[in-house]
Image: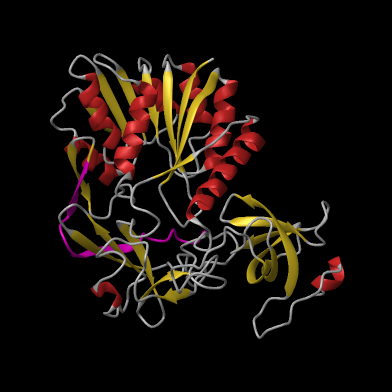
Amino acid sequence: MAYASMNGSDPAPQSDSDGPRITLTVGPVAHGGHCVARIGDVADGRVVFVRHALPGERVVAEITEDTGGRFCRADAVEIVQPSPRRVAAPCPHAGAGRCGGCDWQHVEESAQRELKAEVVREQLRRLAGLEREVLVEPLPGGLLGWRTRTQYAVGSDDRLGLRRHRSHEVERLDWCPLGVAGVGDGDQFVAPWPGAAAVEVAVGIDARAVIVHSAARGRTEGGGQGRAAGDGRRGRRAPRPQPDRIERVEGPARLHHRAGGRQFRVSAGGFWQIHPDAPDTFLDAVLEALSPGPGDRVLDLYSGAGLFSAVLGDRVGPSGAVVAVEGDAQAAADAALNVRDLPWVRVVRRRVDARAIEELGAESELIVLDPPRSGAGTDVIGALGAGAARAVAYVACDPAALARDVATAREHGWELTSLRAFDAFPMTHHVECVALLTRD
């Protein structure tokens, strides 16, 4: 593929790697852990999403994915003119073609947060039509040693690692510098794991749990659906793959965590914020945004293990009420356990949708919305607009989904009153936001 002839750039020396190489000037950061460049370095040139680069750098990029469409993907494999914000990656597995777990190990700490802030600003500008200044706040502890849970892949040699970017190939690891003690290091890296598809390691305040995921029948090692004989015949539907088999091989059934002055018990394989300081940080941001008081009625959507519900229950007291709605059975069970000392907090296991909001939250004055990465969606946001709540605290793990939902909320009479962003996932492109929506 003659990339050099397409733009007049000087091609870098070819190597034994698979992709062609091209010299590019790197443009702005984009959502997803890469920067934007253009072939030919002109405004109408073809877009290249470049990983392991920084805005303003001149790099030799290796094309890693090209479907022939409007864009392609590439890795920066040689830095011709480096940014002053570039640093040496602390992990030997970081870099082009290596572990896909981190995006910004080559970036100085404050610059990582600036890149994330620009992504949040750009998503709000492009998807919600809003111009906002954004400051990404650090969490305590620095860039390394913060992950309290990691799910490792198992390679063909039965050893643990992490998948390479947009690949099923496993980068073999002996340790991971992002993990806390027992998660980023430990005996899980020493022993082989025959028959396992993944091994999940998590710690609480007093114990560690290890969970083995084995691919179920009908599911391939890469997570896709296997194909049984006859599945491809016209008129026949392939059987639905069974979920992975999960076995806890070490540790208690529930791990203990502390946040908001309370102790929480969460299933060993259940959801809890990964950064140890994230629960208290997000709690403080939600409480600051909503200012709940005695007697308030609160609806907590996608309540998980009850982090917000329990602390809000403490704030509103027996004269108030909290309804926690969670679709996952195990998370709902954890939430019920964590609020059992608060009889005015009710946990409802139910899918979060417009009907659930209409039936359970019609009288709610305050709402917490903590949806999955895909966001809440138009139906849920529309149902919130039809209710009587005066404020919504939206906890978002994806800035694009947040911006889409904010755009929808504005159509239903809400405005984005305040926004805080947190670097709860250092070294990665992920950023957590807490947005306050109030009536226009």
For residue 15, side relative to residue 222 (left or right): right
Give residue 202's position: percent from left, percent from top. 26, 59
Front position in the image: 65 or 100: 100
Q: Which residue is drawn at 57% across and 67% down?
A: 232
Residue ranking furthest to the bottom:
16
Q: Which residue is drawn at 32% across and 76% down?
A: 195
Q: Is residue 393 visible?
A: yes
Give residue 48's position: percent from left, percent from top. 71, 60
Give residue 100's position: percent from left, percent from top. 49, 65
Please give the count of numbered marks on the rendered protein: 0
| Residue 246 lies in the magenta stretch | yes
Magenta residues (range)? 237-258
Q: Which residue is drawn at 41% across and 81% down?
A: 156
Figure check: 55 above or below 365: below
Give residue 155's position: percent from left, percent from top. 41, 77
Figure check: 244 above or below 190: above
